[in-house]
Amino acid sequence: MASSAVVAGLALAAAGFAGRYVLQAAKHMEPQMKQALQNIPKSAFGNGYYRGGFDPKMTKREAALVLGVSPTANRNKIREAHRKMMILNHPDRVVGPETSCTTLE
């Protein structure tokens, strides 16, 4: 019993010293970290998402954005995209009801 308490104490002390070392090293690395974060392009995060809301009445352009097809796509391509979207967002699956309504619109 006593030996396990000693081992636990030594482990906590080692973790404390390691944490202190990491914090001291981080202080020295701070300018380099800031420079590295500034060099990351802004488009690296969230680039594939549509920025902006939708109009109250859906247009062909918005429908194409929802389906992920070109606004000038042919009927078969639109039907196939709609079919895939409805399978992914079927009401019997666990998704929000607004997703299925938007797809049907």
Image (cartoon, rainbow, N blue to C red):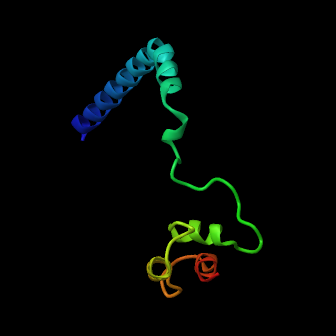
Which residue is rendered at x = 58% and y = 80% of the image?
100
* Place of residue 12 in the rendered image (x, y in percent of width and height, measured from the top left): 35, 30
* Place of residue 68 in the rendered image (x, y in percent of width and height, measured from the top left): 51, 67
Which residue is rendered at x = 27% and y = 31% of the image?
6
The outermost residue toward the left is: 3
Quarter of the image with the N terminus is top left
Q: Is residue 71 left or right of residue 4?
A: right
Q: Is residue 38 placed above or below 62 in the rendered structure?
A: above
* Place of residue 16 in the rendered image (x, y in percent of width and height, measured from the top left): 39, 25
Name the one closer to the observer, 66 or 17: 66
Which residue is rendered at x = 29% and y = 28% of the image?
10
Asked where in the image residue 21 lies, by quadrant, the reply is top left
The outermost residue toward the right is: 56
Numbered-mark total: 0
Which residue is rendered at x = 65% and y = 81% of the image?
105
Name the one closer to the observer, 45 or 63: 63
Q: Is residue 16 placed above or below 100 in the rendered structure?
A: above
* Place of residue 97 in the rendered image (x, y in percent of width and height, measured from the top left): 61, 80
Q: Is residue 10 left or right of residue 61?
A: left
Name the one closer to the observer, 65 or 31: 65
